[in-house]
Image (cartoon, rainbow, N blue to C red):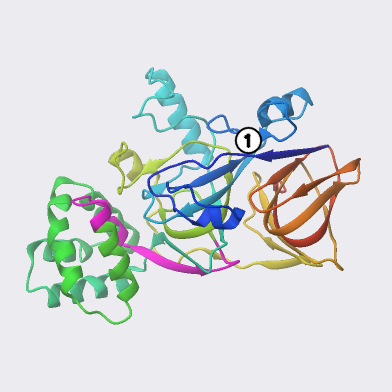
Amino acid sequence: MLIPISNTPRDYAWGSISFISELEGREPTGKPEAEIWYGDHPGSPSRVDDGSGRTLDDALADADQPPLPYLMKILAASMSLSIQAHPSRAQAAEGFAREEAAGIPRDATERLYRDENHKPEIIVALSKDFWALVGLRPLDRTRGFVSRLADESGGLRGVEALQAILEADGDDATVLHGALAWALSDEGVAAVPDVVAALRVAEIPDYEDEQRFLGEIAGQFPGDGGVIVALLMNLVRLRRGEALFAPAGVLHAYQDGLGVELMAASDNVLRGGLTPKHVDVPELLRVVDTTPGPAPVIEATPSGDGVVAYDVDVPDFALQRATVTEDAPVELTLIGTATVLVTAGRLSVTTDSDADAVDLVPGRAAVVAAASSIRLVGSGEAFIAQPGRS
């Protein structure tokens, strides 16, 4: 069965004025458009484009189909999202049970665990450039960066305090765990103005992009300890078609650009700054992985004619990108309920079990259930999400 779906962009403040409207080929609304959700998540279920007024969760239930194990989105950022990490499945189950026992309402602003699931996520760049903070930079590089800030800032106390924290005894992960705790403490927050002042005057080769984005973040979130957390993280520039993966415990904060995001169906978020929302520092420090290293960039690998896959080996989802031309239709085998999202051109979707077709343009999608394969005809690009292999 084929279920055509669409949704209304969510107007979070960090959204872009133009990215989504340009993708869909329409005039911008003049307001930020941050995300479009393609799925049955209760936070913003897609609507079924058949005139019935139903949402996707109702349509799947009516057809005796299970809920989707993943949520697909178009994400459009023009300023930093909150720094955040997600728990493992075991951590989520324990945290959910703890908050249930404490009687914290599931919609409370201080609630951290709204379900028992983990939330790994992948994002693929659609814009020419997509910028993100992901994971903690190797400690030697961060020490070098902060040392130069200290040298060029004339001995600002906040910078010297950060430098001392980074020179503490212990292995790299332990030192960075302490640095995160300090950054989000009253002492770390008090050091933010000095760190920002140093960033504005220093000229450090190989860190120009970091200084630019950290300066923008400081202007967006003045006095927020997340500015120092961001300084500890890898800044990544993706080109169109490149991807990042954020598994459990990895800090991330998307900065600027348009992308297709796919994640496990969960609402569990531990925030680490750059937000007016609730930040529970002890719980974040319990969940976060402070092992430093390069950003987890995912290479696309060929998986058929006109198709590449972004393999992250999680059971909740798998993601493929199909490039279709008039003389080269694409056929894909399915292992579960799939979502087909068109991001360029115009494509027609059919299945092995349904004689009807759904025509899609950029920003529109179709859910494919109870089928073993799909066929894409036309000229354009589509992303296909389905459950991962157990």
Check disc 1 and report its element: helix, strand or loop: loop
Q: In the picture, residue 152 is in which quadrant?
A: bottom left
Left or right position of 111 against 187: right
Where is residue 32? Give x, y as percent: 43, 48
Image quadrant occupied by the N terminus = top right
In the picture of the structure, the residue carrying the numbered disc 1 is 46
Image quadrant occupied by the C terminus = top right
Residue found 62% across the figure and 56% down from its top: 312
Left or right position of 9 against 225: right
Which residue of the protein is positioned furthest toward the front in this rendering? 27
Q: Where are the magenta residues, as a range?
A: 219-243
Left or right position of 181 against 285: left
Closer to the camera, 101 or 309? 309
Q: Is residue 217 visible?
A: yes
Three-letter amino acid code at disc 1? Answer: Ser
Where is residue 179? Give x, y as percent: 25, 56
Residue found 57% across the figure and 67% down from its top: 242
Where is residue 119? Give x, y as percent: 53, 43
Vertical order, 308 against 84 (above or below)? below
Q: Was residue 236 drawn as part of the magenta stretch in this picture?
A: yes
Q: Is residue 164 visible?
A: no
Left or right position of 114 against 159: right
Where is residue 87? Give x, y as percent: 46, 42
Q: How many marks?
A: 1
Vertical order, 336 against 200 (above or below)? above
- Circle 1: is it few (<14), some (14-19), or many (20+) Cα within 10 Å? many
Residue found 66% across the figure and 28% down from its top: 57
